[in-house]
Amino acid sequence: MNLKKSFSIAFAVLMIASMLLVACQPQQIEVIKTVVVTEVVEKEGAQVVVTQIVEVTPEPVVVEQPVTLDWNFGTEPPTIDPALATDTTSVDVIHNLFVTLTQFDPVTGEVSPYLATSWENGEDADGSQTWTFHLRDDIPWVKYDPITGETTQVVDADGNPRFVTAFDVEYGAKRTIDPATASDYAYVDYIIKNAEAVNGGAEGVTLDDVGVKALDATTVQFTLQTPAAYFPAIAGMWVNAPQPSWAIDEWAEKWTEAGLINTSGPYVLEAWIHGGELNLVKNPLWVDADNVQIERVHGVMITEASTAFALYENNELDSTGVPLPEMDRVKADPELSQQYLNAPNPCTYYYGFTNNKPPFDDARVRKAFVESIDRQSLIDNVLKGGQVAATSFAPPGIFGAPEPGTVGLPYNPDDAKAQLQAYLDEKGITLADFNAMGITMMHNTSEGHAQIAAAIQQMWKDVLGVDVKVENQEWKVYLQTIKNSTPLEEMPHIWRLGWCADYPDENNWVHEVFNNQSGANRLRRGCVDATCTEVVPLKFDELTVQAQQEADPAKRADLYAEAERLLAAEEAAYAPIYHYTINSVTKPWLTRNFPPLGGVDFFNWKLDMAAKLAAQGK
Amino acid sequence: MAVAELPQEQTLVRKQRSLWEEAFIRLVRNKVSVASSIFIILLALAAIFANVLAPYDYAEQDLTQNNAVPRWMLPILPGNAANYARITTDYPLGADHLGRDILSRVLYGARVSLSFAVVASLISLLIGTLYGTISGYAGGRIDDLMMRIVDFLYAFPFLVVVILLQTYFKALGRASGMIGFGAKLLAFNDAMGGMLFLFVAIGLINWIGMARIARGQVLSYKRKEFVEAAHAVGASNSRIIIRHLLPNIIGPLIVAETLAIPGYIFTEAFLSFIGLGVNPPTPSWGIMISEAVPALRSYPNQVLVPAILLSLTTLAFNFMGDGLRDALDPRMKQ
Amino acid sequence: MTRYIIRRILGFIPVLIAIALFTFVLMRAIPGGPFDFAGDKSLPPQVVANIEAKYHLDWPMWKQFLSYMIGDDLLGEEGISRGVLRGDLGPSLRYRSQSVNDIIATTFPTSAQLGFLSLLLALMIGLPAGIIAALNQNTWLDYSSTFGAVLFLSIPNLVLAPILIWIFALKLGWLPVASWGAKPPYVLGFLPRLSQLNWDYVSHALMPVFALGTSSAAGIARLTRASLLQVIREDYIRTARAKGLRERVVVVVHALKNSLIPVVTVLGPAFAGLVTGTFVVEQIFGINGMGKHFVQSVGNRDYQVITGVTLVYGVILVIANLLVDITYAWLDPRIRYD
């Protein structure tokens, strides 16, 4: 009996379901497009953001397929608010949505005009360095309407169209510095007068005291705490982009949602389905709109590299990275090998030594470990992406960076053995005693780092006869471990990290990363005590400060060359391994660039839509 | 159908053997189960004597031979593999991405994977059955409380616990000059190749599911006539549980446990990968599979070798489990 | 029974509070907070202080937990959250324009659809396979059912999913490589809109549902077989058979119902696990689900998201386990609570 009852219930459910389906058929035919609309409504006396679906009835005329780029952002951007962004995905989106004071030339990588057409430095009454930027006045603030699909210029309360002004720049920089904004990258602006004090909540200074001021609608002046020759690059960073105060005041943290956001760049935000898609459309009111060829960017967020590569092979992405394990196959494939390209990426992979932990407190040991790494073999057999063997820190293209291989310690197994032997002899110990010290290398948990570590572990074993224990930790735990406040006995002797350029100057490299006074000093150089509560500057540390304030480019370059040499060759405080490359494949119908400083600028790319549709069989 | 042909009369004949004795006799009569047991024993022997059998050391790497493939394996690779694959005669099953012999690594890997599978199963079977049986048998508020604890542990984010373990245990390991119990524990862990923490981690989590199954079974059996009868003649609770309930409920528990084995092997791989298990370059099947998956489309052979071994082993454990289940079933007498 | 259910539901409260409390505390015990670093760049202490102040991470732990549970306004502080008890799971620390409620509202429906379909598939394959195997014990049907089940069980999704993509998306070109067919917002918060239920939806769902469903199906099949074999020799089944009832009726009406207890036991947590998302499948198929988001949040130390997702999972789990216990009593009337 029970069985019969269950059957009849199941049958009834099926019937109802199918009736519902049928009932909805006519509706289904009419709807050709659904859009997501986010708006703010009054609810329970408070403003609440509501996202809802709007189904739009068909338009009578079929429009031609816009030139669409299919792109993988790789992950959901944590934010597209210029004041808050820290990661490359967010910065990539921001770069296409917002104009900045300066930009890096997509070919040469040099700082070049963008919103600012010219700039000059000077001194104010107190003798502080100032930088004055003269802006163009014809870049409109725009807004995209998801329902009509139209991009319109933003108007102010009186109905006047809004253009990007120096006041927006001042507001943007100050908003980043304001402690209430809680921006991670506020420290980038600490070079601006009083910014550090205000951001740190010091008494007696307010946002008004910060050294950024709009002199008029097209002139903005920055006053610096300490002189910096590279300031135009800092001024062009996303944290100092002009920001729309009126929109931020109105929508608070929701101002970056599609439909609410006001932007100033070559693209506007069409839709942002969190975690799923982020789509851009061309801004028709952009000053250089005629040269923006790609009309729409359909961006997905696929984290898994092999899935993204499968999408590419299936013509669902127009360009993507090549996963390392696929490299052999891509290079051998007649079609894929033609689409493959590796471009330099301004990043360096390195192994740091804990310079005050025995036996790595002796330069001979560190040299032995550096000189026994066969970087070229690692690149040819493990990394396979045409990376450049690094013997010093900053990669080519960074101001002041030495040519790879000219400075530092190359692969030299004989000298490595000799250095270690000299150490052993002096201490009167054997290799077995040395191994008994339990040399530990640590990296953060990742398949790629594990492979490199396994290869280098074997090189140390082969050349020096040293057994190194390799450990790994989850990323955030790892970052805590390798801080210089970790007790020495818990520190690994060797650890890995990488560094990428924020702006193309050596200051961003040797000074910010390794200077034991201003950087994190993870290498624990010049430490008086084990956990570096007191640190003495060494020759290297004096040089990078001197170079920071030097105005003459030639002298600066010399100072940096010497600093690089001291750190890599003389102290051998760390082991540079390689400079990164971007290994990517691009469909023949897409012409894209690889800016020397990384990032993606869709507005400079070209796409042959007819060829793409043909390949997709449409 | 097959069931109808069971010789029912025989169940009436009572021989004076204990349930457990009879179970053993039934077990050795099941041919598939015996064959599976032999396979597992052979595998265990291969693992124990890996140092004799393996042509290379598991850690020995020749970077210039990375991803090398023996000629006979070429047909498994994609069509254009001949263009990119490095052909070798030195490695019978090929070499991995760092130029390490795959055959040697699966042999050594069997050590970790097999011992982990066996120990993890036993621990979780033991704790889970005990906990679940007590909970189900006691019933009422005790059952409620014990099951709410299980709910709590179930919902508890495993990943968070694992990171905590990784942080604190390993930090202890690096801190030299440690004394007392911690130091002994670490020495013991090192002696076991880092596996002690694996067992601890797995022991902490995997009994939970087993406990719920055991409880469900006890709930359904504890009101049956033979249990009531045992009660009536004044049998103690522990005697009822061990002599009457356990043999009746153990079948699904064993099956669930044998099914969990691949899960254990991958848990081990995950734990090892994040540095909580065996230290690299020590291999295990789970680690080998995880390392080779990204290269699946270029070098499927690297995944295939450990994956086939894993499947065969799981299969053997399952057939052996089935045999055990049949043998322990007090109603299945022949 | 009603009293039992009420008692159980009251029992949820301490369990859920304990889950929230322990997750909350343990997350903060793990080294590395959400804001100490941007990438691997260590941030100046004043920058970290600003952000921590904004999210009240500078408060003592008890106060943070209290505000997490009952809301900031009741503590007389500036509000970032109205408290879990009033349905606000707080702001995300990583995705700074989104709240945890926003994130769960977008990720949970996708995971739930995927998990529900997988479970359906698992039952549709697993139950019949288990029954057939049991009724033909130790024949080739039984062995091949075991073989098939174990095969699918021992191929991890990590391997199966890329193989499926390779064959069905790239070689044959039948199915799309990745992503989920329906996009939010959803009907009733989790169902796809009817206008989305088309081939596009089905084709996107096929591979992930298959990958997830088959391993569960294998488990169900094996457990059904084992349990059915146990029950089939019970006295009352023999009685039914002796009464001359047809074999099929005996099995379906009498034996199967009783044998489902272990299967149902496993289904409870499996249901909770599947509908709240599985990391590997969501990651490989690029599906924006809760499982993937949870793992990423642990990496990002997004405390609020981790606690929120764990709570959602906890609620579904305790409800599923309650349903399991109620089902026990229905499957086997001898099971009584109190």
Image (cartoon, coloured by chain):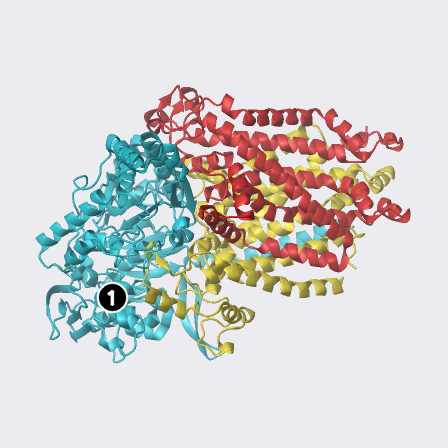
Horizontal relation, residue A225 to residue A304: left or right: left
Horizontal relation, residue C251 to residue B117: left or right: right
Q: Residues within 10 Å of mark 1 (few under 14, many from 20)?
A: some
Horizontal relation, residue B93 to residue A91: left or right: right
Instruction: Give the percent coordinates (x, y) of residue C33.
Output: 42, 59
Comparing B97 with B59, the one in front is B59
Comparing A72 with B18, the one in front is B18
Question: Type of residue at label 1?
Answer: Tyr
At 28% from the left and 34% from the top, the residue drawn is A372
Instruction: Mark yes or no: residue A383 visible.
Output: yes
Q: Is residue B93 above or below residue B195?
A: above
Q: Is residue A524 above or below residue C86?
A: above
* Colour in which chain B is drawn: red
Instruction: Give the percent coordinates (x, y) of residue A546.
Output: 15, 57
Instruction: Give the percent coordinates (x, y) of residue C258.
Output: 76, 46
* Colour in which chain A is drawn: cyan
Q: Is residue B43 above or below residue C67?
A: above
Q: Which residue is mark 1?
A: A190
* Colour in which chain C is drawn: yellow
Q: Quadrant of residue A365?
A: top left
At 63% from the left and 41% from the top, the residue drawn is C219
Instruction: Mark yes or no: residue A59 visible.
Output: no
At 75% from the left and 37% from the top, the residue drawn is C229
Label 1 chain ID: A
Which corner quadrant holds the C terminus of chain A?
top left
Q: Is residue C272 above or below residue B53?
A: below
Label 1 residue SS? helix
Comparing C309 with A247, the one in front is C309
